[in-house]
Image: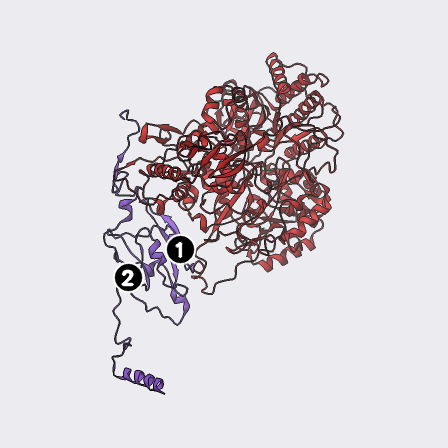
Chain colours: A red, B purple
Amino acid sequence: MPDKIVGNDFGPPKAGPKDGLQGGSPHKIVGNGFGPPKAGLHIEIDGKSHPVKAGENLLQAILSLGLDLPYFCWHPAMGSVGACRQCGVIQFKDANDAQGRVVMACMTPVAEGMRISLQGPDAKAFRAGILELLMTNHPHDCPVCEEGGECHLQDMTVMTGHTVRQYRGLKRTHRNQDLGPFINHEMNRCIACYRCVRYYQDYCGGDDLQVFASHNHVYFGRQEDGVLENEFSGNLVEVCPTGVFTDKTFSRHYSRKWDLQTAPSVCVHCGIGCNTSPGERYGSLRRIVNRYHGEINGYFLCDRGRFGYGFVNGPARLYQARSAETGPLDVSTAENRLRAMLEDAKGIVGIGSPRASLEANFALRERVGAERFHAGIGDAEHGCLRTLLDLVRNLPLHLVSLREAERADAVLILGEDPTQTAPRLALALRQAVRNRALAIADELGIPHWQDAAVREAAQAEKSPLFIASPAPTRLDDIAARTCRASPRTIARLGFAVAHGICPEAPAVMGLTPEHEALAAEIAQALTSAERPLIVAGTGCLSEDVLRAVGQIAAALAAARPGRATAVHFAVPECNSLGLALMDAQSLAHAAHTIESGEADTLLILENDLYRRADRTTVDALLTRARQVIVIDHTLHATAERAHLVLPAASFAETEGTLVSSEGRAQRFFAAMQPAGDSRDGWRWLGPWPCLDDLTRALADSLPVFQQITACAPGAAFRIAGQKIPRQPHRYSGRTAMLADIRIHEPKQPEDTDSALAFSMEGAANDHPPALNPFVWAPGWNSNQAVGKFQDEAGGHLSGGDPGIRLIGDGAGTGLPWSVPPETEASIADALRLVPLHHIFGSDETSMHSSAVAERAPHPYVALNPEDAARLGLAEGEEVELAPDVWLPVKCLPGLAAGIAGVPAGLPDLPVPVTAWQSWKPNKPGDETS
Amino acid sequence: MISQLRTLWIVLKHTFSRADTVQYPEQRPKLYPRYRGRIVLTRDPDGEERCVACNLCAAVCPVDCIALQKTEDVDGRWYPEFFRINFSRCILCGLCEEACPTYAIQLTPDFELCEYDRRNLVYEKEHLLIQGTGKYPGYSFYRVAGKAIAGKDKGQAENEAPPIDVHSLLP
């Protein structure tokens, strides 16, 4: 086992208290493999000298300096193509040149001593002319366009000074397409900057959005009407500089950006922890937009995160407390009832939730005691998370952020389909395979931002990506090799890779020759890579797979002494890792405590137990418990069976801390007041006067969370004595929105839990990144204003990316080499069940959004076509998955033999696949066993 | 002394001049169409609501007394689901009229906004909407805008070419 870890592949850790688990560990960094920082240059802009970074293009440099220059086709994440001609500036030959020539800033590399002019009359006239040309066909639509008020085209038009239309010709028009439930299409507004296809095809790997026709007829759309298939299509809304692609769900309850009350928030639909800005108007949540985070989501969100907000005001939302006997209760009655029930209890079993904040879970833990606090997740998942933490604590692992994942030059995915379980990670991996292309570009001296040139030079060359998974994944198209196998076999393959990297690791006996060869190839690729990355997770609920990842990491660390191995473990929910760090008891333990009579009351926080264990177990548990109390924001099967249901605030209405799969603790804030009688989950549970007290108590009582108070400034934080407003300064309708209810305008609600105010008044500037509700800068109304909040274009947020990493590069004492598992015995005529995840469908809360539900699959049992033929089952034929649960067979070519895939977490699928069960298909007419 | 007598003379002279005050409400002053009084919402020449719920009036309102919510009908037209002006706050500055891109919101010469109860000064859309076009008779926003609505397809707005056939190979 390796000795001492002195670094990982992704540069030095930031100074300061970061390594929560190894507090004060003696890590010494010996280098980061990226060479010395490039020397700074100076360029002269309009007679003034400015320092810039070598290797950048002029546009990047100008924007990084905080100067304004209009642009359309350039995007920090996608580089330059010089398509729109908008960013023209004057470049002078030398100090004596008075005339200069127009160059495109985005296509011109900076050079020492370069003299340019942004404000020269020729430069301004050129840009105004280009904009006027771009506007010749633009319709007179702004009042009825969802982009209006946050439109990059509007901003740039104002910036260039174009006000009066001189063109007298006819405007070209296009017909629109129906692009599915997420995106509106309005092609007339297009200015042909090509950003959408570059994003959709080049960045996301989608192939169903294309550009058709030529010259000013170009058309960006699908070949025919239909759903945009890519899981990241929602970003087109922000990528498109004008209103061609707009958010269809938002359009249904539209509000201008200046009218939305927003807060810095964190997405709650998977474990990645993307930063979001939810926007509220008239008491309902209207939309989610990306909130830039330099280490995590950057500019992009997945569609589940962007469109899955419907549960906050959905039909299943709980607005009022209710009792099973007497129906709806008012707040004080509910409080009294809760108190009486808890006093009456002979022992309380608390069940926490991976979708509730650390604070809410901790409040429950304090209420019921640590030994009666349970995690509220399936036992298989519980086991996986325990194993995962064991690895993270004891092995030389470095949990990578997504920015780091994008820089990996060899990736191995074991047992996971990241697109379905941690979507934003999949998008990062898609960028990681481009590192080979960037290396080729480096050899040829092509700067990375020269997008077309880099792609031309690299052709189809990719960094190696290996995927071993039970079913086909959405990243197969960029994979060097894929392997379809059962989780056990995947684990065995992983152990063989570890042996291939470090011969000390035990060898795996009885592998097929193909797997032997594949393991050797993967081992070779990982060893020769500069920044190898291993991706796994709880997706196939196999501890063997996780142990195999640990083995590979240990082997790599042994082969590369002193460097931690980069891994990313996808976890299913937004606080799965945080809850795991609290070391809660398993659900089986809760059942045992209730069964044995030690306790008779169940206190369930934001959790539907029917998603965690099979129906009979949960039925038995709920029946056996004398009192069941559920605190949640959404009505679900467990809440329906509770004796008392208390309405909790959703993520958009409460504050708290979540721990992402990177081990990063992040604070999210309420965008709006809790709806109806609902209140913060923790407020029902304890006497905490404000969130900061609770966070402080948590940090004090569990050492692993010691740093979380530093995630974001506390409630006492002020800028020049003022709070930070959640509403933009042009928030409208203040004296009319409630006038129909009460003519006397109410005082703005006070927020005692954070430094944010439910108001348009307060400190307008200098918000710390963790507390910045939205981006806006003078002249920049669209989300592209984010450039004004970054240390450099596309870089980190000024003031540091928010969040505190609780898990440092594990050094621990190491673990002994694990023994590879045996091949499982095959069972005659039976298959093993494996959960198959779906970005739209497997997440509980997002399925309350009608748009997401529309994209979810119908329940099915997936079989390899050969297995189906062997068992005499045809596509569509109904089989019995569990007693009285009949599902149609779906033939899934590419699914590993011997397994049956069942969609995980679909709402109308009552039996969650909790473990590696065997299953024998019954057809109608068969005798049920 | 002379100055005081002069002052008396000037004041007394006014006894014989015509009074500027009129006997309101028996006598009414002449108010011109551009007078900034009570706000109305008008209809386009086809009788449809002109307001497209763009929110510009609400944004420009210095006292924030306009609140509305956009919705869309089956024809594809945007219109306000509700449109509320709190006249107890309104200062009749006319900025909303200036901001309106569709000539929907207009100020009228009716200034007689008096109520015993402030609640009666909260006007909803049904109180604001009139039957006619107001001061701008000919204008219809959707005849100019590129957005297609029922009865006006792509390429049928003013100054628009027919829609491109993307499948055509002709230049």
Which residue is identified by label 1? B60
Residue tagged 2: B34
Residue A603 seen in render: no
Residue found at x 69% / y 48%: A600
Q: Chain of mark 2?
A: B
Q: Amino acid at mark 2?
A: Arg
Tell me where residue A727 appears, x and y as whole percent. Answer: 50, 52
Placement of A115 over or under A685, stated as above or below: above
**Kind of residue indicated by mark 1:** Val
The chain that hosts pointer 1 is B
Picture quarter with the N terminus of chain A: top right
- Under circle 2, the secondary element is loop
Marks 1 and 2 sit apart, C-alpha to C-alpha, by: 19 Å
Q: Residue A655, percent across and down?
A: 59, 49
Can residue A270 be seen in this snapshot? Answer: yes
Q: Is residue A793 left or right of residue A380?
A: left
Q: Quadrant of residue A146?
A: top left
